[in-house]
Image: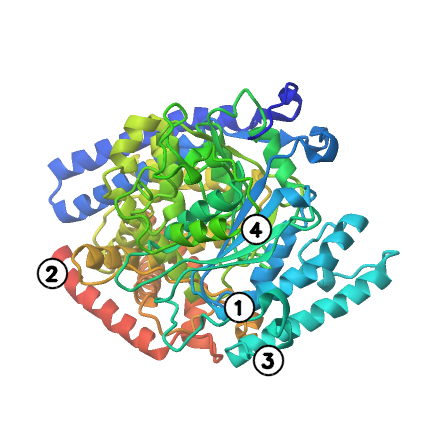
Amino acid sequence: MRPQRKDSTTLHTCRPCLRTVPYRIYAVIHTCAIGALMYHHAHSLVTENTTLITSLLLLSDVVLAFMWATTTSLRLYPVHRFEYPERYVAEPEGGQFPKLDVFICTADPYKEPPMMVVNTALSVMAYDYPSDKISVYVSDDGGSMLTLFALIEAAKFCKHWLPFCKKNNVQDRSPEVFFSAKSSNSWMDEAENLKMMYGDMKKRVEDVVNSGKVNDHHESIKSGQFCGVFDLWADKFTRHDHPTMIKVLQDNDTKIMPNLIYVSREKRRSSPHHFKGGALNTLLRVSSVMTNAPIILTLDCDMYSNNPSTPLHALCYLSDPKISSCLGFVQFPQKFQEINRNDNYASEHKRAFDINMVGYDGLMGPIHVGTGCFFNRRVFYGPPDNLILPEIDELGSNHIADKPILTRDVLALAHDVAGCNYEQKTNWGSKIGFRYGSLVEDYYTGFNLHCEGWRSVFCSPKRVAFVGDSPKCLTDVLVQQMRWSVGLLEMLFLKYSPLTYGFKSLGLLMGLGYCHYVLWPFRSIPLIVYGLLPQLAMLYGVSVFPKTLDPWFWLYIFLFFGAYAQDLSDFLLEGGTYRKWWNDQRMWMIKGLSSFVFGCIEFTLNILNLSTPEFNLTSKANDDDEQRKRYEEEIFDFSSSSSMFLPLTTVAIMNLLAFVWGLYSLFLCGGGLGIELMLAGFAVVNCLPIYEAMVLRKDDGKLPKRVCFSAGILTLVLIVSGYFFLK
């Protein structure tokens, strides 16, 4: 069980953000302005004959108003926390440290290279933590012999890597990161020898990946404990149809090295596997049987540990008797490496992982984001005051796993609970473990845990805890966002929806906070309406906004500039820059006109049984040198002929035509429509990379001609249609 400290108040502190009071004052003012805008729309519906235009604008503004309300709920009680891990003093022989189970998930050795998995595993095995207390479980949902081979190599290398890191207090404990950095320490001779060992291991693994199979005569598996380990891979073995495989690659009987366990659950095409949520529940059961640590860390395979004292930061909260009884998890932010200078794809996700998190933390705690999270194992077995017992005692959170993990009965039970039909007629996925029902199982699980009464804490140390890879291709970014959109829409229509059950269980502010992401895809509505309707109206000389001399004109100006100014201040106060903020808001528009639109379409097809939900894994293998070069130079890459670019390109063309026509009307005809022209101009500035990709660029990252031609035809159709609706 977790230790509880009598002096817990000295381990962490919490203080409100300085911007809280000004934001609350502005929230009142902005709310009044939104109320005035709704009155203006209602008055226009009654007194004017532009019912269609006013109705569409009203719908868009209602969506924008609700979006603003969800964002504001996260601005009313933001807090910053600080931990003091140096004060967490261990008892002799590490008695103060609870056992720690680490779950690492991977699924495809080509999209998630095995050496990436190896570096993540080695980085957490080398924590500043008693080695005999750490057990690392790697879930390979693709059942790949390539990944298993890489982990066998890692098990051998760690016997040299871990002692080196702890002896020399190395901070970069991912070998790839450490050996890529330049250093001039006194122990460089030892490091050079290790670097050669690592290079040899890396070459062996990459050779196996390139060949696509592990030869029986390979030196690593000819003899010893790994002899015959690949015999299960037969002709009928596929990633979607294979038996359970659990291999203990290293055990901590010697108390020198952590446990390293490879797990690939049984899969059959006839049995649902529930994607990543199902894989995590399998790890939860297997680890319960083998080690049953009270603390669980979940990681994506690309998210290596960057801070060796991260578990101590988490224990500053998890060991606090004042909060531990209802503290479900400690969430760390996701940080990403090799992002270009101004982050033109908004890959930092600063709003999601920094700005909004401190807002959630002041309410019931941060949402779960799928990786970098330390869980109290008890959280997966019902509310704090109502323990739900699993079907067998060995899977309970209070089970004492004191048998050696290599004993026959332990391994037999572990294989049994990893079977594809094990969860039938049980509470797994509904009341126990990670929850099923949405592609965003992390968000949905965190929501259910909060509804049950658990709380969470946001922990963001000065030295970043975890660092991962982000997509370097625009298409990958948009496909990832589309997958999230489908999963969030699935949550919206579940029995326990944030829009209904959330408000009842969590209260107004936290309920709005969860709706902030669940309603993400609906942001496409105002972007489409404001991206097309005023521009079409301007082409036909129809006014949809108050004219410059109308007092209502200033209401629109205030709402626009006020919202953007507050958004910019959020970004700057959390350490961002103006250029990154500008790129972030541009990507918000790009996603709204691509990922969110197609996410809604995909979700609709799913519920009509015209499509099957799929978990499209984002590739972390950045092998395209030209694509990488364009990314480093901050050049947008539209190389894919994806239809996802069609709405975006159509809006870009429409706004350019409207802006040119508006300038013509203003300077040559002595007239013009103020807000419509400003809106088109703002869109044109945001769409400059699109125009460049359409006309000026000759490289492979330009917009495909098919997309440009289709967008041109669609723009023409909209203009012709506008004649009948607007004239």
Residue that carries the numbered disc 2 in the rendered image: 724
Q: Are marks 4 and 3 in contact (CB under 8 Å)?
A: no
Q: Secondary structure at mark 1?
A: loop
Of the two numbered discs 4 and 2 in the rendering, the one whose residue sits closer to the viewer:
4
Q: Residue furthest front?
A: 408
Image quarter (top left, top right, bottom left or bottom right) of the C terminus: bottom left
Q: Position of residue 410 (x, y in %)?
A: 49, 48
The alpha-carbon separation of the residues under discs 4 and 2 comes to 65 Å
Q: Nearer the viewer, mark 2 or mark 3?
A: 3
**Does residue 502 appear in the picture of this structure?**
yes
* Residue lying at the far right of the rendered structure: 186
**Disc 1: which residue:** 229
Do the residues under discs 4 and 2 have CB atoms within 8 angstroms?
A: no
Up-down relation of residue 688 to residue 17 (above or below): below
Binning the other alpha carbons within 10 Å of mark 3 as few (below 14), some (14 to 19) or many (20 upward) gives few
Horizontal placement of 386 versus 701: left or right?
left
Give the mark toward the camera: 1 or 2.
Answer: 1
Given residues 200 and 636, the one toward you in this image is 200
Q: Nearer the viewer, mark 1 or mark 4?
A: 1
Mark 1 residue type:
Val
First in residue order: circle 1 vs circle 4: 4
Q: Secondary structure at mark 3?
A: loop
Q: Identify residue for label 3.
A: 217
Cα separation, mark 1 vs mark 4, equals 19 Å
In three-dimensional space, the C-alpha distance between marks 1 and 2, rounded to whole angstroms, equals 71 Å
The quadrant of the image that shows the N terminus is top right
Q: Which mark is residue 136?
A: 4
Report the amino acid beneath label 3. Answer: His
- The residue sitting at 55% across, 49% down in the picture is 405
Q: Is residue 455 above or below residue 274?
A: above
Cα separation, mark 2 vs mark 3, equals 75 Å
